[in-house]
């Protein structure tokens, strides 16, 4: 701007004005990543941070400014810290987000009191509204060079010429309307934090402060009878880097020592260890999801006590290896073998798994299906089989030929036509035993003379699969 350059100026014109100009190709992906990193850093001032792409941020500092010495001091802290890191910063504070953004383009560093928005933006050029080149050019051709000129016209005239969207933008810039920002992260239910006058870097001090924050968080939740289901610990480094460590729980947590133990397990199991760099100047612990705690009798009810211990064990394992790797199985109302069981995360479905009703096995009868099913049925080579619905006499699986000595079946299973992609061929399942005593569960994919026939009613190729192994 000081060299006479402006956004949108052709490169040839820019070089004519400033011959020593250095040119680099824009990297939009890297620019957004940098903006998101800055947004993470700004979380130390307020949890309500929104992106204003491609180069801006909104910070809702309602109720936060006094923690940093007031609005003027907060503005200086943010701008000073970013400037020291090599960024060109333009910032302003106003009652509406659009008014603040308009001021940043022409009057950086300005703080507008409530009700003085129109007076602050009126002298600014219409380009400061950021309404686009077409609307800005149309306003200038109409002789409306400043925001005050546009505001002096009737709203119906502006709407008829430039649309209702521009009228809404103008009113928000003048403080006559407002729209809430869309924070990039949902606001946690509870937040506690600790700021340090001198950065901390040792594991002992970090663990001690995290334990203290856990006690504060539990106290805050206990006042409203709630427990945490998802916890996040955020560590803000002095160089601006932010590391957030999440922990999920199967049941609402109401004890500080449990929170402390879960985070110790999580931190010890990190593939990328927590690097304090030159130290953390802020540690924050938040409960992003909470639930009302239902009180249960725990002294005499052994089942409740056992369930609590099991849930605590699952939480500790999940904190170390990841919640998606600890699963329980739920029965499904279907006759398709690979769909009869659904694997779900144990932390969120432990109660449902404990109450699930599984089909009871008939005593003194062999199992109809194997205990071990393959994730995907594996193809086998069957040189010949009894037609139309008989078993194979031998088959080759994993380059080993098995001679069939005993057979049970067929058990016919048709696909679920009423569901999406349920038009697969019918299967005939057989329980097969070979000469070595190994027992297999195999099936033929399709029926002879109907599903295994081409358009000219000629036999089509037959496909056989092994789906599981019996013990």
Image (cartoon, rainbow, N blue to C red):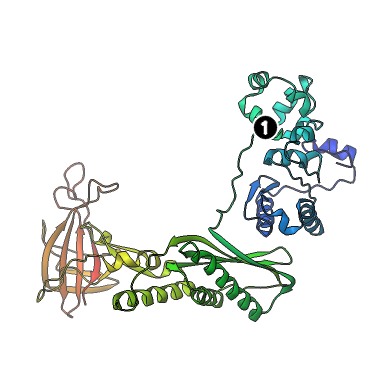
State which quadrant residue 412 falls in: bottom left
Judge from the rendering whether residue 206 lies leftward or rightward of residue 388; answer left or right: right
Judge from the rendering whether residue 270 lies leftward or rightward of residue 456; answer left or right: right
State which quadrant residue 343 falls in: bottom left
Picture layout, residue 204 above or below residue 3: below
Image coordinates of residue 96 in percent, x first then y, are 68, 40
**Front residue (pair 384, 254):** 254
Picture layout, residue 365 above or below residue 419: below
Image coordinates of residue 385 in percent, x first then y, are 14, 62
Circle 1 — which element? loop
Picture layout, residue 286 above or below residue 1: below
Q: How crowded is mark 1: few (under 14 residues within 10 Å), some or many (20 or more)?
A: some
**Front residue (pair 427, 295):** 295
**Front residue (pair 285, 440):** 285
Residue 341 in sight in this render: yes
Image coordinates of residue 311 in percent, x first then y, are 39, 73
Residue 381 in sight in this render: no
Position of the C terminus, as image quadrant, is bottom left
**Front residue (pair 18, 67):** 67
- Report the label total: 1
Residue position for label 1: 176
Q: Residue at x 68, y 79 (%)?
A: 202
Position of the N terminus, as image quadrant, is top right
Image coordinates of residue 466 in percent, x first then y, are 24, 66
Q: Which residue is drawn at 79% across and 50% down?
A: 89
């Amino acid at each position: 701007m000081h060299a006479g350059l402006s956004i949108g100026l052709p490169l040839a014109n820019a070089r004519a004005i400033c011959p020593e100009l250095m040119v680099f190709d824009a990297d939009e992906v890297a620019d957004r990543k940098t903006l998101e990193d800055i947004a993470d850093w700004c979380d130390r001032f307020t949890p309500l941070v929104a992106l204003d792409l491609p180069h801006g941020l909104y910070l809702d500092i309602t109720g936060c400014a006094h923690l940093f010495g007031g609005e003027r001091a907060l503005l200086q802290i943010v701008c000073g810290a970013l400037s020291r890191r090599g960024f060109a910063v333009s910032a302003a504070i106003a009652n509406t987000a659009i008014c603040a953004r308009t001021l940043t383009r022409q009057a950086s560093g300005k703080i507008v009191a409530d009700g003085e928005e129109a007076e602050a933006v009126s002298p600014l050029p219409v380009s400061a509204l950021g309404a686009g080149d077409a609307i800005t050019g149309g306003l200038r051709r109409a002789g409306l060079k400043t925001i005050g000129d546009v505001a002096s016209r009737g709203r119906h005239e502006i709407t008829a010429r430039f649309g209702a969207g521009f009228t809404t933008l103008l009113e928000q810039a003048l403080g006559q309307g407002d729209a809430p920002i869309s924070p990039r992260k949902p606001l946690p239910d509870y937040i506690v934090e600790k700021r340090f006058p001198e950065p901390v870097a040792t594991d002992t001090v970090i663990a001690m402060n995290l334990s203290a924050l856990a006690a504060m968080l539990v106290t805050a939740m206990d006042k409203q009878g709630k427990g945490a289901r998802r916890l996040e610990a955020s560590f803000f480094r002095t160089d601006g880097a932010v590391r957030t460590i999440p922990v999920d729980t199967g049941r609402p947590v109401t004890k500080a020592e449990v929170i402390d133990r879960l985070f110790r397990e999580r931190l010890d199991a990190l593939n990328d260890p927590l690097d304090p760099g030159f130290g953390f100047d802020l540690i924050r612990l938040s409960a992003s999801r909470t639930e009302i705690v239902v009180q249960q009798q725990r002294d005499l009810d052994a089942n409740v006590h056992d369930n609590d211990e099991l849930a605590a064990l699952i939480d500790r394992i999940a904190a170390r290896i990841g919640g998606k790797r600890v699963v329980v199985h739920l029965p499904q109302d279907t006759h398709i073998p690979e769909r009869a069981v659904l694997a779900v995360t144990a932390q969120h479905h432990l109660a449902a798994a404990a109450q699930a009703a599984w089909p009871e096995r008939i005593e003194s009868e062999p199992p109809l299906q194997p205990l071990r099913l393959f994730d995907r049925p594996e193809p086998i080579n069957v040189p010949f089989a009894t037609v139309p619905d008989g078993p194979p006499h031998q088959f080759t699986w994993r380059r080993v030929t098995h001679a069939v000595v005993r057979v049970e079946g067929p058990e016919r299973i048709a696909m679920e036509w009423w569901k999406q992609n349920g038009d697969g061929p019918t299967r005939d399942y057989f329980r097969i035993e070979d000469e070595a005593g190994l027992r297999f569960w195999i099936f033929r994919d399709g029926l002879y003379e109907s599903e295994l026939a081409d358009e000219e009613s000629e036999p089509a190729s037959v496909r056989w699969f092994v789906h599981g192994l019996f013990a």
